[in-house]
Amino acid sequence: MGDIILTTPVIRCLNAQLGANIHFVTRRQNAFLLDKNPHISKILTVEKDPMELFGFFSSENYDFVIDLHNNIRTRRFTLLLNRPTSRFSKLNIKKWLLVNFNVNKLPHIHIVDRYFQASAVLGVSNDHLGLEYYLPDNAQDQVPEYSSGIDSDYSVIVAGAKHFTKQIPATIAQQVAARLTGKVIILGGTEDAEKGRQIASIDTKRITNYCGKISFDASAWIISKARVVITSDTGLMHVAAAFNRPIITLWGNTVPEFGMYPYIPKDQNLYTGIENKLLDCRPCSKIGFQKCPRGHFKCMLEADVQKITTLANIIKRD
């Protein structure tokens, strides 16, 4: 999900600077992330492969194709489509060197700026206005009893992530929640429901668990009003960046050097990264695993709880 949100600056600039009529292709389950974006003319969905829509694309006669995914399927598709095309560089070899040999040859450049490199041939430049996430009008109505607690000063802890080795462990989240001042809201998906319950169990009056209870858009609305968001490398981290919220990111098996840290060009001071740089096993993957390859998960279990909560508690609600 995060990579979809990271495309929004390019979408905005293509539309604003060229007046481009933009068709955006994504998997069906991700379409809701962009279906309210005013810069997109049409969202085209596939189950897995863009070849599912090849007949439609062939008849559209597009002026230009920008491939921001750049995998085997999209390369095959664009070659067969035979339209002018540019692709962003995934830097997979350099990521492989960092993961496997701890040799860092990666450029110090955010993935958003690499997306812009793919569109530079069209004369499009970065407006540095950051990410965007558009909420439905009824997003807050999807939050149970929002008027009794969501209106007040609160912090958010994001409990979930697609891969286990990116997730904040329940024990660490409990320690953080216990030390945070004010109300705390736990966010995550249905798969994080029990974990959210465990975290909130330490103080059910002050900590609210919404894991698996509300939609992604409702979670995004909660984040948009939060005093601070404590998260791992996950989609809701990029939502927080889109709303210019203060973010504290706990890095597990991935590292900011991959270029997918919170993108907040308006105020880079809103982001603080917490990571254990003393571990020689990080990064162990550019994506993530369902268990720690070394069996110890020290990258998360040894997170500096005191530093996290000290940073979070000094942030004032704007």
Image (cartoon, helix red, strand yellow):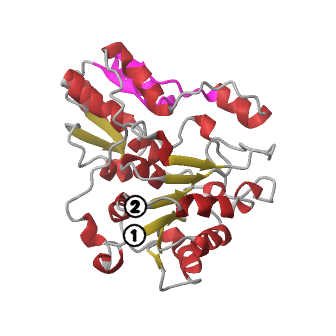
Q: What residue type is labelled 2?
A: Arg
Tell me the residue that label 2 is attached to. Answer: 317
Give how far across and how far down residue 194 sits, in percent. 56, 77
Of callouts 1 and 2, the N-terminal one: 1
Indicate whether residue 299 is drawn in magenta.
no
The residue wearing badge 1 is 153
Q: Examine the rendered structure and indicate whether residue 93 appears above or below residue 253.
A: above
Q: How crowded is mark 2: few (under 14 residues within 10 Å), some or many (20 or more)?
A: some
The answer to whether residue 96 is seen in the rendering is yes
Q: What's the distance in space between the residues labelled 1 and 2, CA to CA?
A: 7 Å
Q: Say few, some or many: other residues with alpha carbon within 10 Å of mark 1 (under 14 / 14 to 19 / 20 or more).
A: some
Q: Is residue 130 above or below residue 241?
A: above
| Residue under the point 55% across and 56% down | 162
Please state the extent of the stretch shown in magenta in the rendering.
64-92
Please tell me which residue lies in front, 299 or 292.
299
Q: Identify the element where label 1 is drawn.
A: loop
The residue lying toward the viewer, choosing from 19 and 287, is 19
* Residue 296 percent coordinates (x, y): 80, 59
The three-letter code of the residue at mark 1 reads Asp
Q: Residue at x 59, y 83 (%)?
A: 202
Q: Which residue is drawn at 57% across and 72% down?
A: 177
